Image (cartoon, helix red, strand yellow):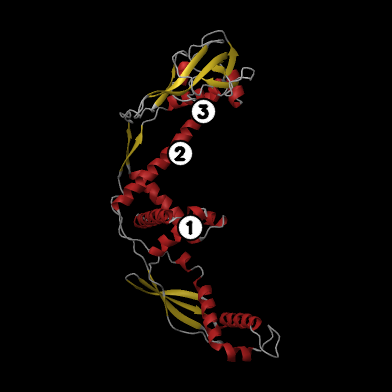
Amino acid sequence: MAYELIKEDGNKRVVQFTMDASDLKKVFRKVKRDISKEVSIKGFRPGHVPDSIIEKKFGNIILSEVAENAHKQLTEGLFDKFDWVLSDNDPEFENVLPVEGEDYTYSVTYHIFQTPEPVNYKEIKLSVPTYDHEKAVEETIDHIRKQFVSFDETDQLSAEGDFVFLTYPYPDGKEDSEPKELTAVIGQNAMGPGFDEIITGVKAGDVFTMQMKVEKGDDPGLKDPVHTFTVKEVRVHSLPDLNDEFATKAGGFETMEEFRQKVRDDVTARFDSEMKSFTERQAIDNILDSNVFDVPRFMVENLTQDYVSRLEDEDSTEETKKAAGEMAERKVREFLILREIAIRESLEVSEEEIDQALATGDSRSSSLDRNRNEKALEFVLNSALIEEKVQEEDSQKPDTVSWKWVSVDPSEASDEGEE
C-alpha cells in the first residue's frame, strides 16, 4: 500500500496510489460480507449468501464500494506527508476499477491553492499604551483594601464612603404601617444622579424631601412623586491599615512587602498577557489589510458552519450567518497568510514539537499548521516597530442624564404620589 507524487504542473499535483493484491482481497471480502448481511435472497440466511451469487447480482456495486474503501485507506495520512492546501476544484480520479487478485493502481490529480506572496509583514508599525505599573499596583491594592471596609457608628455628618440607613413611609400611607428601609453607600451612585449628593452631610434624625427634576426634553421641571426620608443611622467607613496584618488577612502573606510584590507580579503578568493579545491582533489586522485575496470557499463554508453550530438555534438568523461567514473568511485568510510567511521565511517546526502535539491527540498536519503559524506571528512581532503612545484624554464630555434627584421644600413640592 503506497502512494507517490509523480507529477507537478503549476497548481496540479498528480499522485499515484497502489494497493497490493492481498490488501485488496481483504477489502473485497469485507464488502461482499457486508452486502450479504443486508440482502434477502430466498433459500439463504442473511450473511450466508455464497460469494458467487453476491458477485453475480451485485457485481457493479461491489466494485464501486471496493474502490471507495480503497481510496479512503490509501489517502489516509496523505496530507500529513504533502503539505498542501486544496483549492475549490474537486480532485480528478483516474477511472480505473479494482480487480480481485491483482494490484490496484490508479492516479489522482489534486488542485492546490497557492497563496499570493505576502507583502508588508516586516517592520510593521504597532503602538501600545503607556502603562504605569506602580500606579496599577497601588490601585489594585486599594481595590482589595476596600473589600475589607468596615462601618462604625458615628455622630459625624455623612461623607464619601459612609453607609447611610434611611426610612420612608410605607406607600399605603397608613400611620400604623412600618416604614420601608433603604441603605446606600455614598459614592456608589446606586440610586441615580443627585441622590448621593443629597445624603452627604446628614446625621441620624435628619429628615429631607426629594423629587425628580427633569432637565431635558419638552417638559422640564419637577416631576412626581415626592419622597420624604428620615436618616435612621450613619456609619462611617473605616479602611484597614496597609500593614503586615492586612497582608496576612488579604493574601496569606507574612509581610506587606511580600503581598505588594505578589500584586506587582500579578499586575505585570496580566498586563503582559493583555499587551501580547493586543499587539498580535494589531499585527494580524495590519497584515490582513495589506493582503487581500480570494480564499477557497470550501474552507470558509466549513468554518462558517462551525461558528454557526456553536450558536443556539434561535440565534442562527441570516444576519448572524452572514457575520459568521465574514469572520470565517477573514480567519481563513489569516491562516493562509501566516502559513505562507512561515514557508517563505523557512520557519521550521521540529519533530519534537510535532511529537508533543501528537501526544495530546492532535494530527500531524494540524499540529504543523498551528506551530508554524505561531512561529510566523512571532516572527512578525519580533520585526515590528512598537512604540508606546500616551492615551489621549477623551475631550468629549459624556452625555448628561436628563434628570436628577433634588432636595425640595415639602411645603412647596407636589404631594401627588408621595410615598
Q: Residues within 10 Å of mark 1 (few under 14, many from 20)?
A: few
Which numbered mark, 2 or 1, is in the foreground of this view? 1
Q: Secondary structure at mark 2?
A: helix
Q: Amino acid at mark 2?
A: Ser
- The x, y position of residue 372, in whole percent, is 43, 54
Residue receiving disc 2: 273
Residue receiving disc 1: 306
Depth order, front residue of 282/4: 282
219 to 152, vertically: above or below: below
Residue that appears at 42% across and 76% down: 108
Depth order, front residue of 386/405: 405
Taking the image as shown, residue 9 lies to the left or right of residue 244, namely: left
Q: Residues within 10 Å of mark 3 (few under 14, many from 20)?
A: some
Which numbered mark, 1 or 3, is in the foreground of this view? 1
Which disc, if any, is residue 263?
Answer: 3
Q: Secondary structure at mark 1?
A: helix
**Is residue 162 among the parts visible in the rendering?**
no
Q: CA distance from mark 3 to mark 2?
A: 15 Å
Q: Secondary structure at mark 3?
A: helix
